[in-house]
Amino acid sequence: MSFQCPVCKQSNSLKITHSLELLPDSRSDEITLQVVACIECGFEGTAVYEASRRGHAESWEHTGYKTPADQLHELKNLINQCPAPQTPKCACPAHQALNQHNKGGRWLLPVQLANNQPFPMILHWQSVSGDHDDGAR
């Protein structure tokens, strides 16, 4: 799975390099905190993927954040220390630090990310035949 880089605008260059599955919250059934990197220009940032299967249809939101290098380094270190990054109920220090919820049960974006500039995670589709489809019709 690849995305369009917010810096160089290459449509198949932004890749997820690290991810940590988090506990569901009062709105989302699935929450994943990610580190993303562009293989073309070297940009790195963070992303949050949230999906909800409640109600009549599935909905999702995938937002990237331009993130300073020191914050990226800290997040990568946390994720790398986790013995089970795909297990939301893991009790490691990374999951404990990043699985924070407010009183209403909503997941809290880590403070250091909340002040960063968001960008859309534009998915690049590639069919089995190799044809590119960016979703624009």
Image (cartoon, rainbow, N blue to C red):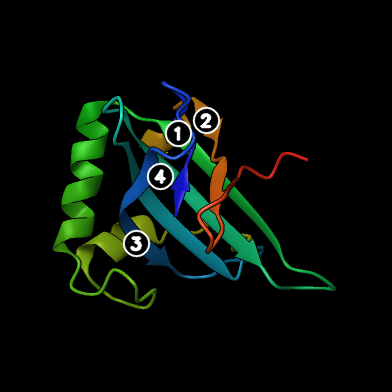
Outermost residue on the front side: it is 129
Determine the CA span between mark 3 and mark 4: 13 Å
Name the kind of residue labelled 2 in the image: Pro
Q: SS of the residue at dot 3?
A: strand
Q: SS of the residue at dot 2?
A: strand
Q: For mark 1, does the 10 Å Cα neighbourhood hold few (<14), some (14 to 19), or many (20 or more) residues? A: many
Q: Nearer the viewer, residue 8 or 91?
A: 8
Q: Which residue is disc 1 drawn over? A: 65
Give whichever of discs 2 and 1 has the lower sequence position: 1
Are the residues at dot 2 and dot 1 in contact (C-beta closer than 8 Å)? yes
Q: Which mark is residue 118?
A: 2
Are the residues at dot 3 and dot 2 in contact (C-beta closer than 8 Å)? no
Name the kind of residue labelled 1 in the image: Tyr
**Residue 109 seen in the figure:** no
- Could you tell me which residue is drawn at 25 percent across and 46 percent down? 75
Q: Nearer the viewer, residue 102 or 73?
A: 73
User: Which x, y percent locates residue 62?
Assistant: 56, 48
Outermost residue on the right side: it is 56
Give whichever of discs 4 and 1 has the lower sequence position: 1
Q: Which residue is disc 3 drawn over? A: 20
Q: In front of the other: label 2 or label 4?
A: 2
Determine the CA span between mark 2 and mark 4: 14 Å
- Could you tell me which residue is drawn at 14 percent across and 62 percent down? 81
- Could you tell me which residue is drawn at 50 percent across and 59 percent down? 101
Q: Which residue is disc 4 drawn over? A: 110
Give whichever of discs 2 and 4 has the lower sequence position: 4
